[in-house]
Amino acid sequence: MTSRNGKVQPVQNHTVVAIVEDKPGVLMRVASLFRRRGFNIESLTVGPTESPGLSRITIVVDGESAPVEQVEKQLYKLIDVVKVSDLSHEDTVARELAMIKVRANNVNRHEIIEIANIFRADIVDVATNSIILQVVGDADKIDGIIKMCEPYGIRELSRTGRMSMVRGPKTTTVHEPEPESIARVHATQGRRVEGVELPFSSD
Amino acid sequence: MAKMTGAQILLECLQREGVDTIFGYPGGVVLPLYDTLPQFPGIRHVLVRHEQAAAHMADGYARATGKLGVCLGTSGPGATNLVTGICTSYMDSTPVLALTGNVARALLGKDGFQEADITGITQPITKHNYLVMRADNVAMSVREAIHIATTGRPGPVLVDMPKDVFQEEAEFEWPERLSLRGYKPTTEGHPGMIRRAAELIDGAERPIIIAGHGVIWGDAMDELVEFAEKAEIPVINTFLGIGGFPESHRLSYGWLGMHGMYYANMAADNADVVIGVGMRFDDRAMGRFKDFNPGAKIVHIDIDPAEIGKNFSTAVPIVGDVKRVLPKLTEQVAETRHPNWVEWIDRVREEHPSLHVRESRRMLPQYVMRSLHEETDGNATIVTGVGQHQMWAGQHYFFKRSRQLVSSGGLGTMGFELPGAIGAQVGRPNDEVWAICGDAGFQMTMQEMAVLVDEQLPVKIAIFNNGYLGMVRQWQQLFYDKNLVSVAVTQPDFVKLADAYGIRAIRVETKAEVIPAIREARAHPGPVLVDFQIDQEENVWPMVPAGAALSETIEAPAEELAR
C-alpha cells in the first residue's frame, strides 16, 4: 500500500485462530473458503489442541484482500468451525519455526555456529559440507538469521507458519466438551475410518 | 435393536423426518437403495429424466411448501448433473437434501468407473456436506444434514454414500439429540441493537423497508405487516421477496432492482433509513453499490451474520430470525405517520407507473401475464425460468401470499421453470401451478414433460415464445450496439412436441386468442402446454443498466412504446 507521500507502507496482516472439529475435509473447507472469497493466506498452521476432537488452525491473512470481520463471519458459517478469534489487536506471543540447511566446511563452520548462537538457534545436524540450524522466533528474527546465512549458501529452507497465543490468562479455547455421543463413537471406532485412506483428508 | 442396512437406515431416517417424496434417477451404485425403496411405501419416488431436473424439483417443492426437498442421483455423472440445481438452491437459500451414491469404499480415490469427488465438487455450493463411510454413521449424518438444511439460513446439504455403505449392516439407533458445536444459529436478535434500531426508525423522516426472501422463509408476513403499519413505513420487496408482503396493501410499493418498479427504486434511493429485512443487498437489487443512496442509514436484520456488512456498511446490525425480531421491533417503535413521504412515493408512482400495459394490437407479453393474473384471480402458483418472461411475471402478476412465486433469483438458472413447477405441484397438489417459460429456457429441461404424464400432474405450461434469448438480445441491443449474435433460437413445434408426450397443447398466435386459451387450459384437468407467440421485439422496462445506480433507472424509450 502506498501512502500519500509516496512511501511504501507495509500492509497490515491479521492473525485469525479457528478452533475446528477434527474431521476429514475441514482443512479443505477452510482453504476453499479463502480461495472462493479472494482472501490471501500468508501462512496457515494446523495442529491438535488441549481438547480431544478439536484442531487449531492459525491463519495469517493479508489485511488488504480480506476485511477481517468478513473472514471471521465466513469462517463461522462453516459447520465444522467451532470458534474464531481475531488476535490482530491482542497482546500475543507469536512464533514461527525454521530449519535452515547451510553450506559449511571446516573453514567457515565456526562462523555459522557463531551466527546460530547469536540467534539462539539450535544446531540439529552437522555433516562435512552442511549444517542444519533450527530457529524459533517471530518472523523478523527468522528473516534475520536467513539473511545472515545467505552468504554461505542456503541449500534448503523449511519454515512453518505463525502460531499465536494471547498473553495472560485469557484463552481462545472452546470450553464445550465433545458431545458424549460423538466421544463414544470416537472411543469405539477411532477417529479415522478403518482400512480406508480418504482421498481428501485433513490429516 | 434391529440390524439394518445402510440403505434401510437412510430411508428410515427420511421417513421419520417426514420426507414423503424423493426426486431421483437410479444408477449402478444406488441400486441397493432402489432395491430397498419398496419397503418404504410412504416415500414416493418421482423418476426424472435428467438429474438437474431432480434438484430443481426438490427446490421447487421446498419453495412451494416450506418443507425440505429431497433429490437423489447416482455416482459420477448422476452426481455432477445435480450440481446446477444444488447451486440454485444455495444461492437462494432453500432447504434441499441431495443424496448421492459413490463407488465402493475400496475404490474411492482410485478413479473407478463413475467416480466423482462430489463432496469436493459441491463444497462451495452447499451449506455443508457429508461423505458417510460407515453404516453406523448414516443415522447421525442424515439427521444432522436435515437439521442444517432446514434451520438458520436454509440451504442445500449433500450426503454422499459409497455403494457398500448402503449394503453394510449396522444397529439402527435413532439419534434423539444432535449436538453440533460449530452450528448454533442466532435467532433472537440483540436487545440493545433492537433498541438502537427502534430509535433510528423513530427519528426517520423517510424510512423504507426492503423485504426479502427471509420474510418468506421466516414465515413472517403478519409480523412484517404489523411492523410496517405501526410505524407507517412503505415496503418494497426484493425479487425473491415477492409475496412476502401482500401487493394489495396500501404500503406495498412493488419491488426494486434492475427491472424493479421506477417508484420502488426511487423510494429506496431517497429514503433516509433503509431497513433490510431478510435480504442480502444483492447487486441486482441495489444497483451500483457505491452510489446507492449514500445518505441512507441502514438497519439490517438477517439470520446470517456474514451477510451483514458484506456489501454495505450497516448503522444497526441485527442478527436473528425475522419472525422473532420483528415483533420486538414493532413493540419498541413509536406509532408514527409519514404522510409527506408516502405522498411523495405515491406521486412518483402516478408520474411513473411502470406497470402500465399499453394498448396494442400486438400480443404483448405484459398483456398475456396480466390476463393470466385476471383469469386466475391472482391465486395461481407461478414458477418461472430466467429472463424477460421472469421479469414480466414478477411485474404483471400480483401476488397475495408467500410461496406463490417460485423463481431462481440468485443463480438465475434457465431451465428451472418446468422442473420447478413439477416440484411445486407435487408439494401442493391442489394448487393451480403455472410454469412460465421462455422458449429458450424451456428447451433446456423440456424432457421433464414426461414426468407430468407419469405422475399425472396438471401443471399448465405457458411458453412466452418470442424466438429469441430475449434478455440477452435486449442487452445486445442496448449495450452492444444492436449486434445480435447467437440470440435467435430455432425451436421445435412445441404443440407437436407436447402432443408426442401425450400432453394437450394450444398455439396462440393472436391477442384475441389469449384469454380463450387460458380458459381452455384451466378447464382441462390434466397438464396443458400453451405456446404464446408473443410480440418478438418487446423489451423489459424499467431498467437499471448494468453497473448503473438505482437513481439512473430508465423507463421504456418513446420509440419502443410507439411501435
Image (cartoon, rainbow, N blue to C red):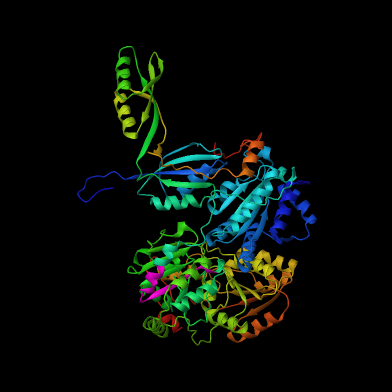
Q: Is residue B288 left or right of residue B484?
A: left
Residue B141 visible to an observer of this rendering: yes
Instruction: State the image coordinates of residue B202 (x, y, percent, origin top left).
Output: 38, 74
Residue B480 visible to an observer of this rendering: no
Question: Would you identify the image quadrant in which residue A144 lies?
Answer: top left
Residues B78 and A90: in front is A90
For the view shown, which residue lies furthest in the top direction? A106
**Considering only vertical position in the picture, is B364 above or below B417?**
below
User: Which contiguous range is marked in magenta?
Assistant: B197-215
Q: Is residue A121 left or right of residue B133?
A: left
Instruction: State the image coordinates of residue A101 (x, y, percent, origin top left).
Output: 39, 23
For the view shown, which residue lies furthest in the left direction? A5
Q: Quadrant of the C terminus of chain A?
A: top right
Residues B275 and B526: in front is B275
Decide whether residue B253 is among the magenta residues: no
Q: Is residue B35 left or right of residue B288?
A: right
Q: Tell me what residue is drawn at x 62 percent, y 43 percent.
A: A180
Question: Would you identify the image quadrant in which residue A43 lies?
Answer: top left
Q: Tell me what residue is drawn at x 38 percent, y 52 percent.
A: A67
Decide whether residue B210 is among the magenta residues: yes
Instruction: State the image coordinates of residue B124 (x, y, percent, origin top left).
Output: 53, 51
Q: Tell me what residue is drawn at x 61 percent, y 55 percent.
A: B147
**Considering only vertical position in the picture, is A138 above or below B174?**
above
